Amino acid sequence: MRARAAVDRAHTLSAGALFYLILPVTLLLGLLLSIVALAEPEDAAVEEHSSEAMDALLEAGEEEGILEESDRELVRSAVEFGDKWCAR
């Protein structure tokens, strides 16, 4: 009976030790996955939506007489230039 209790206690201790060994690894992997998720580029659909919104604003400004056609093209080209990635 004592041998059985000792084996049960050893299993309990090893399970507890295993928990404390795996917990930091799990937390570290979760942190790394969060960092990788931040570094991922945004979806193209989101960029297309913002481009459509910008075009709508520029068109509305032109219709209201706030922007001229040349100003509209200047703003659009400046925004497109800012969206490009620099090649190394």
Image: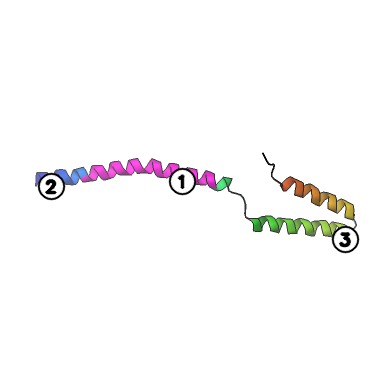
**Disc 3 residue type?**
Glu
Sequence order check, earlier mark of 3 and 1: 1
* Residue for badge 3: 63
Q: Where residue 25 sits in the image (x, y, percent)?
A: 40, 42
Query: Which residue occupies 15% across, 43% down?
Result: 6
Towards the viewer: 20 or 49: 49
- Left or right, 84 with reference to 18: right
Sequence order check, earlier mark of 2 and 1: 2
* Gap between marks 3 and 1 measured at Cα: 50 Å
* Residue for badge 1: 30
* Gap between marks 2 and 3 measured at Cα: 87 Å
Query: Which residue occupies 53% across, 43% down?
Result: 35
- Left or right, 22 with reference to 79: left
* Gap between marks 2 and 1 measured at Cα: 38 Å
Element marked by disc 1: helix
Which of discs 2 and 1 lies nearer the camera? The answer is 1
Q: Where residue 56 sits in the image (x, y, percent)?
A: 79, 60
Query: Which residue occupies 43% across, 43% down?
Result: 27
* Residue for badge 2: 4
Element marked by disc 2: helix
Q: Is 31 contained in the magenta span?
A: yes
- Left or right, 86 with reference to 36: right
**Disc 1 residue type?**
Gly
Magenta segment: 11-36
In this picture, is 80 found above or below 45?
above
